[in-house]
Structures are given as C-alpha cells and as structure tokens.
Image (tube, rainbow, N blue to C red):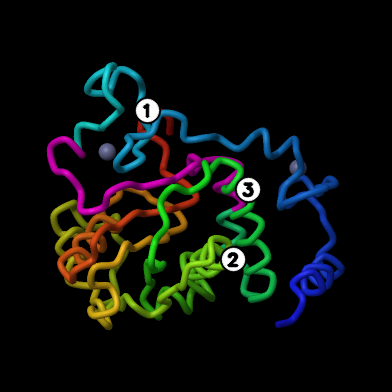
C-alpha cells in the first residue's frame, strides 16, 4: 500500500493550503478558521429527515423533534444526517466542488469537505455494512464531470472503513429538470428511475446512503424504500447539507 502520508504531501505540494473561499491561509482543512465559523449548522433538524425546524414547528417540546411531514408519512429511511445548511459559504464550496473536473482535485476537495463535516459528527454510533451513493444518470454525470455523491461516498468509506458499492444503484431514465414537474409527477418519475443491481448484496444489511445535498428528502426517500423493498435491514442517509427552510431563503 502506498504511504498515505506521501500522497497527502504530494497533494499539498500541488495544491498549497489556501482557504478555498477567501484565499487566506488555511492551516488545516479546506477553509480558514474565519470561514469555518461562517458555515451554518443545521441546528434544529427533524430527527428523522433533518429538515431544519423552528422550535414552534416541532410537534412536542417534550419529545425529540419530528417534523409534521415525517409524522404524516414516516419515510423509509431511519435517519438523515446533514450537519450544515445548504447556504453560503457551503453552497459556494459545493458549487465549486461540482465544477471540478480534475479527479485528484475533486477527491481532495471531497476529503476536505468531509473533514469539515466530520467536525460536526458525533462518533458515529451507526456502523453500516455497506455504503451506497445516490447515482446520477450518465448524461447528468457528463455535464457535471462526475458524481459528487460517489466522490463523497468513496471518501466516507475510507474514513469509516466500510465498503462502498459504487454501482449498486442504477438510474435508468434521464430525469428532466425536476422543478418543471409537480410533486406527484416528480415522485413517480423518481420511483421509476432507480434500480438495484444486485439485491442479494443488500439483503439483511444496514445501508448508509450518501448524497451531497438533501433538498426535499424525496430522492433519498424513494431510494430508501427501494433498498428496504430489496431486503435492506435499515437505511441511514448522510449528506453534507440540507436545504434551508423556506422562511430562511
Ligand atoms: Zn477563508
Ligand atoms: Zn422530518
């Protein structure tokens, strides 16, 4: 095995440690301490879907916070972890991260973004058997250059030493711009677009599903249902960020 230290040194030599946002000196990680302080934490998430909530939108002050959507329609996943809100500066970081077409640089950025995210993680109590990234259709992937969820899954897999099933999920049809469709059309479109390649490999397993940003939770909800239908024991979702609530946008 190639010494990880050597590779890191090489990467650092190629890409000196400058803050990704302000170009100032970043002693450790992707961004400097000042910009790190600007990241917006997802402070009061629904304990199931991580939807950011105000204290007033919670069902009960005595029990843990569960949003009304999760109470009405309990999702197929057990839990979404999304430590940050998808807003500046993380929105800017993820945007640039998606524009990166150089694989080494993409990986380094994802490692560094992940390290930032890990600062917000408690020691993971959940030890998955298998990590599965949310796939993008090849046409979308070509436009973007790569699948950010797959890059993150790879970094997380190495980080917590869990195998990654890169091609477990297949996205069959090209999904047109989701915002042009209404919610029902969108869900139907989504349900039909994913396929599990080798169901025997997820049967009875605890699956960790990785996405870069969770917007409404409908994509990960549909995939979690598909994984459960194919015998997954449980499904957790990790993402870097959750879209802020409408009242904050
Ligand atoms: Zn900075
Ligand atoms: Zn919820």
Number of residues whose C-alpha sits closer than 10 Å to that of mark 3, classed few (under 14), some (14–19) or many (20 or more): many
Q: Earlier in the sequence, mark 1 or mark 3?
A: 3
Left or right position of 156 against 82: right
Q: Are marks 1 and 3 in contact (CB under 8 Å)?
A: no
Q: Can you say which quadrant of the picture contains the C terminus?
A: top left
Counting from the top left corner in percent of width and height, residue 227 is at 23, 66
Name the residue nearer the viewer: 129 or 169. 129
In what element is the residue under mark 1?
helix
Number of residues whose C-alpha sits closer than 10 Å to that of mark 2, classed few (under 14), some (14–19) or many (20 or more): some
Left or right position of 25 against 66: right
Q: CA distance from mark 1 to mark 3?
A: 26 Å
Q: Which callout, 1 or 3, points to the residue nearer the camera? A: 3
For disc 3, the marked residue is 116
Query: Residue 78, relative to residue 168: is it above or below?
Result: above
Instruction: Give the residue displayed 39% in from the left and 61% down from the top.
Output: 128
For disc 2, the marked residue is 99
Q: Tell whether position 86 is magenta.
A: yes
Instruction: Give the residue displayed 36% in from the left and 40% down from the top.
Output: 50
In what element is the residue under mark 3?
helix
Counting from the top left corner in percent of width and height, residue 59 is at 22, 23
Name the residue nearer the viewer: 18 or 80. 80
Q: CA distance from mark 1 to mark 2?
A: 29 Å
Residue 178, quarter of picture: bottom left
Span highlighted in magenta in the image:
70-93
Instruction: Give the residue displayed 34% in from the left and 19% down from the top.
Output: 55
């Amino acid at each position: 095995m190639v010494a990880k230290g050597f590779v890191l040194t090489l990467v650092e030599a190629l890409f000196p440690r400058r803050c990704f946002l302000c170009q100032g000196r970043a002693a450790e990680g992707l961004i400097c301490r000042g910009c790190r302080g600007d990241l917006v934490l997802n402070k009061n998430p629904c304990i199931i879907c991580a939807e950011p909530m105000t204290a007033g939108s919670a069902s009960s002050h005595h029990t843990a916070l569960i949003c009304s959507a999760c109470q009405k329609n309990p999702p197929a996943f057990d839990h979404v972890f999304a430590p940050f809100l998808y807003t500046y500066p993380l929105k800017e970081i993820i945007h640039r991260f998606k524009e990166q077409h150089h694989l080494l640089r993409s990986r380094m950025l994802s490692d560094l973004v992940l390290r930032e995210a890990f600062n917000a993680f408690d020691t993971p109590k959940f030890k998955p058997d298998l990590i599965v990234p949310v796939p993008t259709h090849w046409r979308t992937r070509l436009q973007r250059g790569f699948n950010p969820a797959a890059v993150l899954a790879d970094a997380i897999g190495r980080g917590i030493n869990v195998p990654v099933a890169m091609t477990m999920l297949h996205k069959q049809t090209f999904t047109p711009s989701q915002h042009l469709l209404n919610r029902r059309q969108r869900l139907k479109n989504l349900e039909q677009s994913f396929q599990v390649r080798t169901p025997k490999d997820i049967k009875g397993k605890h699956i960790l599903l990785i996405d870069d940003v969770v917007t409404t939770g409908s994509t990960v909800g549909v995939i979690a249902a598909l994984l459960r239908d194919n015998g997954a024991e449980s499904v957790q979702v990790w993402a870097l960020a959750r879209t802020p609530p409408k009242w904050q946008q």
